[in-house]
């Protein structure tokens, strides 16, 4: 890819307006350290990273380029990576089937699929964790209710040190990034639960 993908200029513009950091070609090693994902395929590359502070952590939204840089991916989206020291549990959740849903587990088996005892959640979301109790601790009731109220579809992976989320239908545009600026802090507070 010699030029930046369509939409990069919109993200750069919004980043300037909001005084956020924008990197069209970010350090990919940082993103690859989050992989492999439990529910999503790993990206070949990451582009168009926008980062901001959310004390005591940070947030980075970036476009996973699921193709060689010379090619075109099947679809385009943004992933949001939240680094925060208060996260200590691990669980993954997937609502729906999406172009970036992981279907093969060559390196290691996936975590077990669990039911957490929340009938509405269990009917709409596939949850993966070492145990049901670990899933409940990583995905507290307030966070599940919030996601269900948003009619969440996509992927959410909570792990020690943070979480990564993919909202299905999110595009690498200024409008969609602007929405993430509001939803990510709310989701973070809900995942951390009452303190």
Image (cartoon, helix red, strand yellow):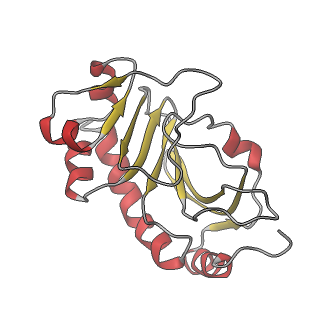
Q: Nearer the viewer, residue 180 or 17?
A: 180
Q: Is residue 176 left or right of residue 35?
A: left
Q: Tell me where residue 30 appears, x and y as whole percent.
A: 71, 43
Q: Residue furthest left?
A: 119
Q: Tell me where residue 123 appears, x and y as whole percent.
A: 19, 40
Is 24 rendered above or below residue 13?
A: above
Is 28 rendered above or below residue 9?
A: above
State the image quarter where residue 167 is shown.
bottom left
Q: Residue furthest right?
A: 2
Q: Residue at point 30% right, 55% down? A: 152
Please state, as top left, top right, bottom left or bottom right, where the C terminus lies in the image. Answer: top left
Q: Tell me where residue 141 appears, x and y as whole percent.
A: 20, 38
Q: Is residue 190 left or right of residue 23?
A: left
Q: Residue at point 13% right, 36% down? A: 119
Tally the numbered discs.
0
Please state, as top left, top right, bottom left or bottom right, where the N terminus lies in the image. Answer: bottom right
Is 19 rendered above or below residue 194?
A: below
State the image quarter where residue 53 is shown.
bottom right
Q: Residue at point 51% right, 54% down? A: 99
Q: Is residue 163 left or right of residue 131?
A: right
Q: Residue at point 41% right, 50% down? A: 97
Q: Is residue 36 left or right of residue 146?
A: right
């Amino acid at each position: 890819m010699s030029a930046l993908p369509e939409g990069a200029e919109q993200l750069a513009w919004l980043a300037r307006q909001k005084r956020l950091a924008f990197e069209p070609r970010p350090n990919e090693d940082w993103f690859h350290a989050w992989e492999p994902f439990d529910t999503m395929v790993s990206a070949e590359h990451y582009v168009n990273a926008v980062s901001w502070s959310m004390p005591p952590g940070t947030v980075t939204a970036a476009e996973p380029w699921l193709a060689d840089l010379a090619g075109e991916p099947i679809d385009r989206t943004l992933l949001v990576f939240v680094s925060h020291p208060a996260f200590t549990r691990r669980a993954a959740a997937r609502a729906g089937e999406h172009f970036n849903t992981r279907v093969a587990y060559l390196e290691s088996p996936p975590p077990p699929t669990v039911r957490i005892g929340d009938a509405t959640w269990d009917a709409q979301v596939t949850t993966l964790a070492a145990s049901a109790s670990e899933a409940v601790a990583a995905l507290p009731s307030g966070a599940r209710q919030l996601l269900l109220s948003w009619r969440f579809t996509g992927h959410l992976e909570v792990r020690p040190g943070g979480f990564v989320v993919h909202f299905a239908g999110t595009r690498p545009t200024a409008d969609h990034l602007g929405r993430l600026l509001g939803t990510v802090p709310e989701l973070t507070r809900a995942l951390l639960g009452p303190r």
